[in-house]
Amino acid sequence: MTFDMVIGVGLTVLALGAVVLLTLWSRRIIERIHAHSPGSLREIQKDIVNGKES
Amino acid sequence: MEKNPETAPETEYPRITTELSRNLTLLHITMMGVGMMIGAGVFLGVGNAVKVAGPGGVILTFALNAVIALFTAMSYAELSSAVPKAGGAYNFARIAFGRGTSFLAGWMEWFASSVAGSLYAVTFALYTVHYLTQLGIIDISGAQLVWIEKGVALLVAGLFIYINYRGASETGTLGALFTLGQTVTLAFIALVGIGTAISDPARLSNFEPFLPNGWDKLLITMGFTYVAFEGFEVIAQAGDEAIDPRRNLPKAMIYSILIVVFTYVGVAFASIVGVKDVGQPAWTWIGSHGGKGFGEAVSRLLPSFGNILVTITVIFASTSALNATIYSATRASYALGRDHMLPPFFSRLHHRRRTPHVALLFTGALVIAVATFLPTIDVASSASMMFLFLFFLVNLCVIRIRRNMADEMTYGFVMPLFPIPPMAAILVQALLAVWLFHMSPIAWVVGPLWVFAGILIYHSYSRHRAIRTEDEIVVLSDQPLPTKGEYRILVSVANPANAVSLARNCYRFCQAKGDKTEVEVINMVPVPPQVPLSEASKYAGPGEEAIMEAMLYLAPRYAFGSTMRYCRNFARGIVAAASERKADLLIMGWQGHRRRGFSMGSTVDPVLEGATCNVAVFKDCQEQQYRNVLLPYAGGPNAAFALEMASIMVERNGGRVVVFHVAPPGKPTIDIDAFLEETLPQLDAPPSLFEPKYDISRDRLKSLLEETSRHDLVIVGATRDPLFRQRVMVSLPQEFARHCKKPLVMVKAKHPIKSFIKKWM
């Protein structure tokens, strides 16, 4: 395996991993917001922080 | 003269509002996005990308493009969850930046979708003619073959223009099934490729050299294949018909990117490993076929039926995407006509078919012109360039809306790691657009020409004709000061009583700053939410009186201006006015009430966060004289301005300012004398006026509140906590301000760098 291939495969895995991770993270945020109810950014941030602390 | 019912302005009767029935599930709208994305980009992109970047380059191209596309999809997702109605970038730009930018967004969207439509027509033609050639039905080569392909592209484009004219379109379950079929077919090809690589590992040597032409070629291939990730934004158009749109629209956008990236990477991999015994490296062989490279590779991977499989997949994918893009391109120009940004005939509906036939005609002309006159790679590059511009704008919109209007929106999704994703997307998209020049200089002529034409049209035609919208700041009356002087104060008054006390306090500040100080008074007219913008002037009475009171007090001595405005969100209107008028200080009142989610008030909090100048918020400051002023001190960037305010508000004869610091037990105290020594030389105030005082207490709030009983005015600096902390936790200054029973002034000094950034945004 050449150096380019190692870096290239690594980058590909990273990129695909990032897509999967961000998708799952976003889905979690959506469900969390809708568990309380959609609101302004301020309200959502407060709900998220209060949810983490409890 | 008889009125034309299609173009005459609507008479204002009470409306019975109707709503489209919501029957599109998460699956439907996800497949809508996937179907649009798999239209042509991957079929044309694999062969062309392999030629430029090599076997590893094509895989990397799709993987890296997916990350950038996902960042933009998250921006779309956030905005769509907050504005879940049809319109997409056109709506977002209108809310974020106003009519001019929204016109540009709609204008670019029109062109981008039309050019994408050309691309899908060309893809259909390429693969269909190629298949017929292989079957021996067509026996032509060279320039004549190119013309046949062009002819087929025009025919299929014309067919779908006609289908759109008739009003039939592929929606809902049928569309979802077609897209599912295409995706499953491509997934099958990918799996066969993976299976082939497992059973014959020697095929992996097709990936050597991984990047034969170098890493820099990636930027080129990412640029022209970016169109393969165009399509998720169409999901935003389904806002009126989707079930639970605030939840499902963002999910669909993000899921669609996830589905297509693995599909693209899988089929790109399968294409490379599928080729064997062609007498040259696999990648050069695939690349030599250009846009047909993918089809050729799959026919090698699946010798018996690969050809027909790809052709059928391309036929379904490209035609459904072509249908959808003609539909959405037409809708973009229709919306511009409806809002009077383009001539009204764009919004004309056919009297029988009820389709926007004029907008469709222009859209069709664009699709056909681009498909006819541009070579395939230039068509793909032009489409990519326009989408890069459009997505660049949407990423700007999400940042600006979060910054200015986050309290007005109801979000179903807020992206993680904000603002990294939109800023990264902006940077990379700008870079890709620039690098696209290497692939297609023509795209860099066509794209900017179109944008420039749009700017010309807006300034010469649309600007004065466009319909006003609910998100705008409306100026009801304006008597501005002609030029900016040495020091300008903007006073926000609500009613005559509030105006008098604020004017008195402003007068003190003017005296301290000198005769060259200028004062502008702003009143934000309170209009009930159900009342339309056109009625705002009916509610202006108290505001006019308030301005009059302030004028009587201040105008005899200082240059005076005024403005009355209306905006659904007062804070946004006040912050915008302060920036527009280049105010050095903004003075406003606060009654002391708090609303859910806010530390101090729904207007005060956003003003303190967003204003780009110094801010002073006055609570219960009706007195003319203050002899005992308390200044709680904890260091921080607002302390110097608080000291200045205290020196102005205190009665100089016999008055005093107590600078008071409370430290928790065991923590070091802050040196008040050092602070006074550093700051007082900049103020026109004798040091004898100021008195340091220290206290040690576990309950700092209680200690501060107890100290206020010995004073008649409190000056406190606003919190220096980062914005996020301010929003989720009540800070000590804010908590103290709410509980303090004495007259209070909360001040916030402008931060040079943050203010510059806010102003720019």
Image (cartoon, coloured by chain):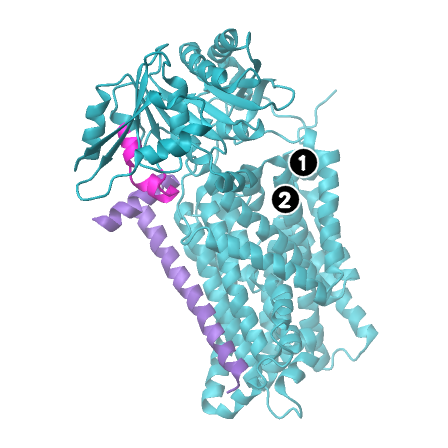
> From where the camera sits, is residue B647 visible?
yes
User: Of helix, strand and loop, which one carries label 1?
Assistant: loop
Residue A10 is situated, as x and y percent measured from the top left of the image, at: 46, 76
Please name the predominant secondary structure of the magenta segment in the image. helix
Bounds of the magenta segment: B720-736
Q: Vertical placement of B688 versus B123: above or below?
A: above
Q: Is residue B729 magenta?
A: yes
- Residue A37's spot in the image, x, y percent? 32, 42
Q: Secondary structure at mark 2?
A: helix
Amino acid marked by disc 1: Met
Task: State the residue in front, B491 or B476.
Answer: B491
x 64%, y 37%: residue: B100
Which chain letter matches label 2? B
Closest to the observer, B398 or B633: B633
Marker count (numbered):
2
Residue B403 against residue B432 in the figure, above or below = above
**Residue visible at 42% across and 68% down?**
A17
Q: Which residue is mark 1?
A: B341
Drawing shade for chain A: purple
Q: Are marks 2 and 1 in contact (CB under 8 Å)?
A: yes
Q: Going by the image, does B188 lie left or right of B312?
A: left
Colour-to-chain, cyan: B
Task: State which chain disc 1 sits on.
Answer: B
Q: Which residue is mark 2?
A: B106
Quadrant housing residue B744: top left
Q: How crowded is the residue under tag 1: few (<14 C-alpha within 10 Å), some, or many (20+)? A: many
